[in-house]
Image: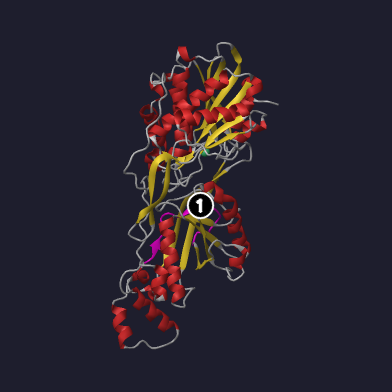
Amino acid sequence: MDPIRKLVDGRLRPGLALALSLLGAAACGETPGAEAREAAVADEPWFGVVLPPGLTPHGLEVISERGAAPAVVPEGEARFTELAGSAIQADLATIVGFSHESRTSREVGDGLLWGRITGLPSGNQTVEWAAERLRAAGVADVELQRFDQSANASIWLPLSWEVRLLADPAFGTGSQDVVLESAMPLSGEIPAEGLTAPLVYVGTASPAELAHVDVRGKIAVQKAIPQGHTVFVRSPVGPRADALLERGAIAVLTVIDLPGNMRVRDIGCGGGTCFNLGARDGLFLETVLGAAAEAGRPDVVRARLQLSSERRGGLSAANAVAVIPGSARPNEYVVVNAHADAWFDGAGDNGDGLAVTVALARHFARPEMRQERSVVFVASAGHHSSGLSGPGSFVSMNPDIVEGTVLVINLEHTAQRHITPARSEHPDGYRQWTMDAHESPIVAGISNSAPFLEDVVRRGIERYGTNFVSGANTMASGEGGSYTRAGLPVFTAMQGPPMYHATGEVLEMVSTPGLERMARFTAFLVKEVSRAPASSIDPQ
Ligand SMILES: [Zn+2]
């Protein structure tokens, strides 16, 4: 097969191979003959590579034609209508609405970044809404506990930016600049006039690859391929961006191979200038770089980066805290925590956990559902904004509750639908993704490895069909850190799916039956824990 054809594997428009051979001939100093001149007429912009699709802010780039598996309702539990998926989904839609407002109001700069941001109106309004919902659930004791950002702490917010591929006549007649709209800056500073440099593709930027590549003075393009859990690529990919900068790259673009063309606000570098790119922008860029390399002109593709940002300090936030007193041991507590903050729409991180927590408050506020121990619901301000820790503030502001807490249950990303690569492709050749009938795998972390809690998880899977992973572990990340540091045992339900800190994490990504599954399972867990001996919950 022709090497160029093989390279781009059908992603080119007709005429590309001829345009490329012409480019190659010019590079070698040959005079194009009549045949080549004729071909030049047929040449097309950007080597004939299909242009990337841009970014659809709240769009879902996943095939979702078939619905999710229904929730399992064990005998006797049908009357718990407050745990029905439809009711929880309605709250989730409201929660996601705070993020939409953040974007339309341009809460941050030009509105390219949005969310429910701790310390900004979007985050604070979400927590205030949660407090109202907890009161409306029938809980008498609901407090909005306000706190200030630590002195000297600040959050970095990118206000406006652009990653622009600069057109060159060598790419083909009619080539015009292409702005990669999925670009998301993670850190860095760029002078007002921008940063212009050639691009260099470095694969996964492993030492073996970098031994053959000179990145000095160039913008390095590396690739990250998450497998199931996006968080798992953080630790290898971030340091590799740092290594590229140390070797002299002036910036790093990380293509994250996930559905569609999303902005992803994760996997940073150590403070240098780095951006993430969505997969379809990434495919375009890789194909163009490949075509230029095949033509013997690897340095001809250049980009201009622009970025303005600010640091915000002196902010304040709040937790909403609701207490339902226990009937037998009111000074002992089961705490259910969910963080309210999010990047972008955040339907799965952590809109679903928060909506389930509000539903659980409705459930346990029913007089006949009163438990032996007190149940506390925390809509936490979150943990993304430096110096504004929701769980840390809860621990320091509620010493009596912490003293009597037998278990913290942290619901953090719990009902997003599972996705896998589809059999079909987008028009540019990028593989589509599709949902299946279940939730993305849920890690059940038990910080103290208590056999009793392990047994509740096992029975919960049998009873409700929750999609917990098989491997036992002590994970208590996200909000859990502040609680484990306070010496409390923590049960964490957490997904780390492909749609993570990404613009694709929209309302439709969350399973309505999955919300119900998690609500019913967690209600079961709270009841089991509330009547268990303390020595079973935390054997020491
Ligand atoms: Zn989270």
Q: Identify whether 225 is placed above or below 414.
A: below
Q: Nearer the viewer, residue 181 or 510?
A: 510
Residue placed under numbered mark 1 in the picture: 226
What range of the chain is rendered magenta?
175-193
Expressed as whole percent of the image width and height from the top left, the position of residue 526 reads 53, 23
Q: Depth check: 443 or 344 in front? A: 443
Compared to 231, does 464 lie above or below?
Answer: above
Q: Nearer the viewer, residue 275 or 43?
A: 43
Ligand 1 within 8 angstroms of badge 1 C-beta: no
Would you place residue 400 above or below residue 194 in this image? above
Q: Residues within 10 Å of mark 1 (few under 14, many from 20)?
A: some
Percent x, y for residue 115? Answer: 45, 41
482 left or right of 47 in image: right
| Relative to 523, residue 211 above or below | below
Check the picture and name the quadrant holding the C terminus: top right
Q: Magenta span: helix, strand or loop, mainly?
A: loop
Which residue shows up at 63% across the image and 18% down it? 533
Q: Is residue 180 visible?
A: no
Horizontal and vertical percent for residue 266?
52, 48
Q: Residue furthest right?
A: 540
Quadrant showing the N terminus: bottom left
Q: Is residue 79 visible?
A: yes
Give yes or no for residue 483 being in the magenta stretch.
no
The amino acid type found where label 1 is placed reads: Pro
Q: Which colouring convention does the figure follow? A: secondary structure
Residue at (48, 44) in percent of width and height: 497
Residue sitting at 46 percent across and 17 percent down? 365
Q: Residue at x 48, y 73 (%)?
A: 298
- The percent coordinates of residue 147 (x first, y second) are 58, 29
Q: Secondary structure at mark 1?
A: loop
